[in-house]
Image (tube, rainbow, N blue to C red):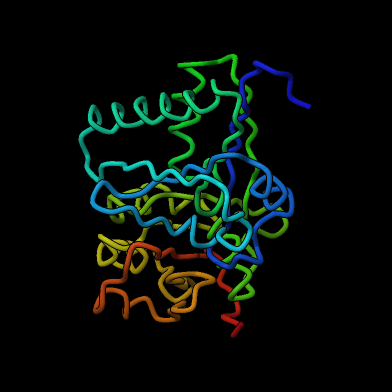
C-alpha cells in the first residue's frame, strides 16, 4: 500500500510483438491498476501501435498520454526529447500516481523505453522503476516459422539493419544464428551481404509479425524487389534449417 505523499512507481511494459494475447499476465495486472499510461508516438501524429495492442486491458478511466519523439538522426534533438519526456513522467509520479510506459516487444531490446529509463535514472534515481519484460519480435518470429533460434552450443547475435549489411559482413563469419532487426530501409544491401556470406537460402524474413497483415518471406530476393515496411526482421542461420510452414 502506497503511503500518502509517496512518489508513484513507473512501470516499463513490453506489450509483445502485436498479438494482445502475448502480453504478459503481470503486465495486464499493472495496466488495470496504474493511473496514467505513457507511450511514444511520432512527432507528426499521436498514433501508438503499443497502445492499440494493449487496449483490451486498459480501463476507460485511465489517462493516456502520448509522448512525441522526433524521427531524426540529430542526437541532440533526440536527447532533449528524452529529457523532456522524463520530466513529464516524473511530474506525474511526484503527484503520487503510478504510471506505465508502453513499448513494443521487450522494453529493453531496441526500445524507446531504454532511453526513458536512462533519462529517469539520471534525473530522479530515487524513483521506483519496475521493468516488465515482453516477448521480443524475433522470439515471436522464430515461433511463427518454427525455427529454433539457438541449439546446443550455438551463438545468437542480434543486430540492427538500419545501416545496411555492414554489420553482417563484419560479424557473420563467427556467428551461428543472426537476427537482423529493422531490416527495411537498406534491405537490398542486407540481402547482398547474406548472398556474399552464403546464407541467403538459410534466411527467412518476417514482416509485421503477429499482426493481421503478417508476411513470411521465404525468398529474401522478394524484399529487394519490393522494399518492406518498418516492422521487418530477418532470421539467418549458418547451419541451415527446415523452413517449416507455421
Where residue 24 appears, as percent x and y from the top left, is 69, 54
Considering depth in this image, is 134 or 82 the residue closer to the camera? 82
Residue at image point 64% right, 74% down: 146
Give the image location of residue 26, x and y in percent. 73, 48
Residue at 54% in and 20% down: 94
Q: Quadrant of the N terminus?
A: top right
Relative side of 126 to 164, left or right: right
Q: Residue at x 47, y 73 (%)?
A: 204
Q: Is residue 109 above or below residue 144?
A: above
Rendered position, 173 above or below 99: below
Is 98 in front, or is 122?
98
Q: Quadrant of residue 36?
A: top right
Q: Residue 92, how many percent across, how many down? A: 51, 28
Q: Position of residue 15 (x, y in %)?
A: 58, 54
Name the image quarter holding residue 133: top right
Instruction: Describe residue 37's horizontal placement relative to residue 83 as left or right.
Output: right
Quadrant of the rendered image containing residue 56: bottom right
Quadrant where the C terminus sits is: bottom right
Q: Is residue 108 visible?
A: no
Q: Is residue 71 above or below residue 211?
A: above
* Residue found 43% across the figure and 63% down from its top: 233
Residue in front for this viewpoint, 161 or 230: 230
Q: Is residue 125 visible to the viewer in this orientation of the structure? A: yes
- The residue lying toward the viewer, choosing from 101 and 71, is 101
How many numbered discs, if any? 0
Residue extending farthest right: 1
Q: Is residue 51 left or right of residue 31?
A: left
Amino acid at each position: 500500500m502506497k503511503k500518502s505523499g509517496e512518489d508513484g512507481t513507473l512501470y516499463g511494459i513490453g506489450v509483445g510483438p502485436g498479438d494482445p494475447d502475448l502480453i504478459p499476465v503481470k503486465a495486464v495486472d499493472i495496466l488495470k491498476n496504474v493511473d496514467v499510461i505513457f507511450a511514444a508516438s511520432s512527432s507528426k501524429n499521436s498514433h501508438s501501435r503499443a497502445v492499440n495492442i494493449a487496449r483490451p486491458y486498459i480501463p476507460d478511466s485511465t489517462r493516456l498520454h502520448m509522448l512525441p519523439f522526433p524521427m531524426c538522426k540529430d542526437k541532440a534533438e533526440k536527447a532533449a526529447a528524452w529529457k523532456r519526456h522524463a520530466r513529464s513522467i516524473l511530474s506525474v509520479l511526484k503527484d503520487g500516481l503510478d504510471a506505465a510506459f508502453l513499448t513494443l516487444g521487450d522494453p529493453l531490446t531496441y526500445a524507446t523505453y531504454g532511453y526513458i529509463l536512462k533519462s529517469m535514472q539520471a534525473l530522479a534515481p530515487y524513483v521506483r522503476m519496475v521493468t516488465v519484460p515482453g516477448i521480443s519480435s524475433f522470439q515471436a518470429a522464430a515461433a511463427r516459422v518454427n525455427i529454433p533460434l539457438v541449439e546446443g552450443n550455438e551463438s545468437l547475435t542480434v543486430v540492427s539493419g538500419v545501416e545496411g549489411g555492414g554489420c553482417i559482413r563484419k560479424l557473420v563469419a563467427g556467428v551461428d544464428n543472426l537476427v537482423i532487426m529493422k531490416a527495411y530501409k537498406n534491405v537490398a544491401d542486407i540481402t547482398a551481404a547474406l548472398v556474399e556470406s552464403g546464407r541467403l537460402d538459410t534466411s527467412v524474413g518476417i514482416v509485421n509479425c503477429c499482426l493481421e497483415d503478417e508476411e513470411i518471406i521465404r525468398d529474401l530476393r522478394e524484399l529487394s524487389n519490393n522494399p518492406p515496411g518498418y516492422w521487418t526482421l530477418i532470421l539467418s542461420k549458418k547451419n541451415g534449417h527446415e523452413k517449416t510452414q507455421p
